[in-house]
Amino acid sequence: MKTSLLLFFTVCGFTYGTAIAQNADLDFKQQLNNNPPGAVFIERIPPVSETVSDQKADRVLSPCTADTMCAQLTTFSGNVRGYYFIAPVAFSICGLFIPTDASTDPQSIEVLRFDSIPPPAYPAITNKFVSLFYVANDTSTSMIPCSIPVQAGDTIGVYGARGTGSVCSYGTPQFNGSIFGNPVILNRTGMQFPLYNQQMHDVWSEDANDISRVIMYIDASLSVNEIPFNDLVSVFPNPFSSSVTLQAENLLKNATLTVYNSVGQQVKQIINISGQEIKLQRGDLPAGLYFIRLVQGNKVIAADKLVITEE
């Protein structure tokens, strides 16, 4: 049974294209040709220099495995590229890695969850998404650990590139991959800006063109048969402001409830849970989107989203 995906993407660019070419890559090249040496490029989001390397140890899930992926077909530099897919099952991304075929410069990676539908076809753009993970200028040449819960039906975008030149390794368009043996198609997506000094915005898709290669590692300890809280555990109220109750259908014994924030960091955990009711206090958690996972033994009993509102 396959337990992972390899994904592809690129980062580069400083641009506003006025002419519509055949695709985003051609638009970027046209923009460079239209600007003389020394031209000033406008960045729409302030530079981001903070990395999350010091938080890696808190986010590693094991075992963390990756599947094979198609070989590099060509390269591209100038703007960030990546891929999006619709999750066929619930799973957890436990690591991300930009292959070193095209460059060994520092990695910059971001993972998005789109609100409801995939990003629109270029040149249309969208900003209707939530960032689940972002790291800039990570100097490692190996997998970057993370813990990003994904629910069945989520539309996920994975983006990244190496170095300030945003070097991308391009692979097969509409790559046919799998998650826990379930087929999934990786479609090309990106933005016309670099990722090493800013986060994703103005995102588009180009399904027929090359995806940019970024390997996604999957937590192989999680079962394909994860069941939403709606089936085995009731959650009320949700959204909530001060506390939430989880009511299990069956008796729990030595279970563990873990809460992750929107970027996959563990923010709260309750261990040695026995009985059928769990009371989760908000504590000092800020308002926003969270993910909860209930585990008993080696089995994930349930996983879902929680929304905390202002008191």
Image: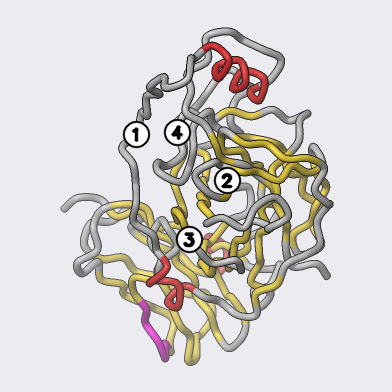
Instruction: Tell me the residue that label 3 is attached to.
Output: 138
| Count of residue discs | 4
Q: Amino acid at mark 2?
A: Tyr
The dominant secondary structure in magenta is strand
Provide the residue designation for mark 2: 159
Residue to which mark 1 is pinned: 45
Instruction: Indicate which disc, 3 or 2, sits on the residue closer to the N terminus.
Output: 3
Q: Earlier in the sequence, mark 1 or mark 2?
A: 1
The residues bearing labels 1 and 2 have C-alpha atoms spaced at a distance of: 17 Å
Q: Earlier in the sequence, mark 4 or mark 2?
A: 2
Q: Amino acid at mark 1?
A: Ile
User: Which residue range is magenta in the image?
Assistant: 269-273
Q: Nearer the viewer, residue 123 or 247?
A: 123
Closer-to-camera residue (46/114): 46
Q: Quadrant of the N terminus?
A: bottom right
Q: Residue furthest front?
A: 37
Q: Is residue 272 magenta?
A: yes
Q: Earlier in the sequence, mark 1 or mark 3?
A: 1
Tell me the CA gap for discs 1 and 3. Answer: 20 Å
Q: SS for tag 3?
A: strand
Give the amino acid at mark 3.
Asp
Q: Residue at x 48, y 42 (%)?
A: 195
User: Circle 4 — which element?
Assistant: loop
**Disc ID at residue 201:** 4
Q: Marks 3 and 1: in contact by CB < 8 Å?
A: no
Identity of the amino acid at label 4? His
